[in-house]
Image (cartoon, rainbow, N blue to C red):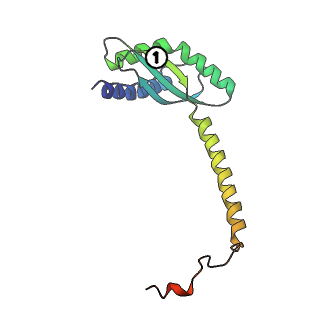
Amino acid sequence: MGEARAKQLADRIQVLVAELLERRVKDPRLGFVTVTDAKLTADLGEASVFYTVYGDEQERASTAAALESARGLIRSEVGKALGLRRAPSVAFFLDAIPENAGQIAELLAKARQADAEVAKAAAGAKPAGDADPYKRREDDDDDE
């Protein structure tokens, strides 16, 4: 029951934080933020919110500062919305999914290129030995 409830509340926290960032937080340092995930501890005391920022390193840093300054507001609004006795503390973490996805896409492109080169080289290739590598003996037919 505890893990299921924590997962359910974490999903709700993800939606709440995204809505708060869109509607209530008016910090000009806040860039184009997407809340990707939220995790909640089993004791419902700490919420980890993962986010991505579209832009360069400077925009990521300014967004992190804006999120840190809005943390108290977000915590109080999340506590009110969830109706918990004690509002969970909120921590923000930059999600590395886009960077990892970019690296995986590059590796897949290299693998496709290598496969194409191998297929191109194999197109006109002939076997190194005989066409039928299995030798047939004359006396195989006699055994039956």
The residue singled out by tag 1 in the image is 90
Residue found at the very far left of the displayed protein: 1
Q: Examine the rendered structure and indicate whether residue 127 appears above or below residue 107.
A: below
The crowd level at tag 1 (other Cα within 10 Å; few <14, some 14-19, many 20+) is many
One can see residue 10 in this view: yes
Q: Identify the image quadrant of the C terminus.
A: bottom left
Where residue 64 appears, x then y in whole percent? 59, 20
Where is residue 105 shown, x and y percent of the image?
A: 62, 46
Number of on-image labels: 1
Three-letter amino acid code of the residue under disc 1: Val
| Residue at screen point 68% across, 61% down | 116
Q: Quadrant of residue 114?
A: bottom right
- Quick check: can you spot residue 29? no
Residue 2 in the image: x percent, y percent? 30, 24
Above or below, comparing residue 91 to residue 103 in the picture = above
Query: In the image shown, does 120 or 44 lie closer to the viewer?
Result: 120
Task: Describe the element under mark 1 as helix, strand or loop.
Answer: strand
For the residue pair 133 and 74, the one nearer the viewer reads as: 133
Instruction: Determine the residue positioned at 37% across, 13% down.
Output: 87
Left or right of 94: which side holds 11?
left
The quadrant where residue 106 appears: top right
Check the picture and name the quadrant holding the N terminus.
Answer: top left
Residue occupying the point 31% across, 11% down: 85
Nearest the eye: 10 or 29: 10
Q: Residue at x 48, y 88 (%)?
A: 142
